[in-house]
Image: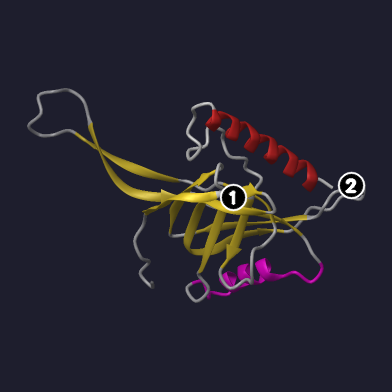
Amino acid sequence: MKFPIVMSINTLINTFRQTSSNTGGSGAHNEWPLVKFAFEIAIGDLRGYVAFQGMDGLGASIATMKFRDGNSTRFYEQSRPTLTSYDPVTLKKGVFSGDKDLFNWFKNVTQGSMFSDLRTVTIHMSELTGGGSTHLFTWTLEKAFVTKFTPSNLDAEAENDVAIEEVELTYQAFSMESHVFDTRIGAIVEGIVTTAVGAAMTNG
């Protein structure tokens, strides 16, 4: 029942964007922030996109090494970048009858087959366009594996709540691709910009 409301919100946003472009704004670079509910996630060998409720935690940080130059006459430390670390990603999805794909992946890792079951996870952030959608950002998680599986909590008083399970993923690195969508012509107008980070695992 929420889908028509979502579409109407997105239509309103696009109307504002088109109005801005007609009054001198740049239509190719949207002036309005993207909505975060339009996304799709694909995992390795699982067929098609998995209907996840949410994704959280994606990020990276660079550690620094502090030192003082032996020839320096100044009394402060200098910093240099060292290793890059990547934050775990948490995925949430509804529980369906007979659906054990995520748990089976977790089970494989617990039984020592991590390196034979490393998967690529693709996260698309989209722009809703008419009857479909266009991917504007894509994050690709390389060599991901499950480090935590949490079944849904149970509550006898929660009559209308959906059962939600969670998995936490650790991965080697991620890359990011971006596209620019022109709302005036309904098409991608700029190419892909890719930023890849990380190095291969020892067993990669």
Q: Is 50 located above or below residue 192 in the figure?
A: below
Quadrant the C terminus occupies: bottom left
Q: Amino acid at mark 2?
A: Ala
Q: Which residues are magenta?
A: 97-114
10 Å crowding of disc 2: few (<14), some (14-19), many (20+): few
User: Residue drawn at (70%, 53%), measured in percent from left and top?
Assistant: 131
User: Residue drawn at (56%, 29%), measured in percent from left and top?
Assistant: 20
Q: Is residue 15 left or right of residue 123?
A: right
Q: Nearer the viewer, residue 49 or 97?
A: 49
Counting every numbered tag in the picture gives: 2
10 Å crowding of disc 1: few (<14), some (14-19), many (20+): many
Q: Position of residue 55 (x, y in %)?
A: 61, 50
Q: Is 130 located above or below residue 65 in the figure?
A: below
Asked whether the residues under the numbered discs 1 and 2 touch, taking CB atoms below 8 Å apart as contact, a structural biologist would say no
User: Residue drawn at (54%, 62%), measured in percent from left and top?
Assistant: 121
SS class, disc 2: loop
Q: Which mark is residue 126?
A: 1
Q: Is residue 105 left or right of residue 100?
A: left
Asked where in the image residue 77 lies, by quadrant, the reply is: top left
Q: Nearer the viewer, residue 23 or 8?
A: 23
The disc, 1 or 2, on the residue closer to the chain's N-terminal end is: 1
SS class, disc 1: strand
Q: Amino acid at mark 1?
A: Ser
Q: Which mark is residue 158?
A: 2
Q: Position of residue 67 (x, y in %)?
A: 21, 36
Q: Position of residue 2 (x, y in %)?
A: 80, 45
User: Residue drawn at (87%, 50%), measured in percent from left and top?
Assistant: 155
Q: Position of residue 39 (x, y in %)?
A: 62, 51
Magenta region includes residue 41: no
Q: Is 200 located above or below residue 16 in the figure?
A: below
Asked where in the image residue 146 lies, by quadrant, the reply is: bottom right
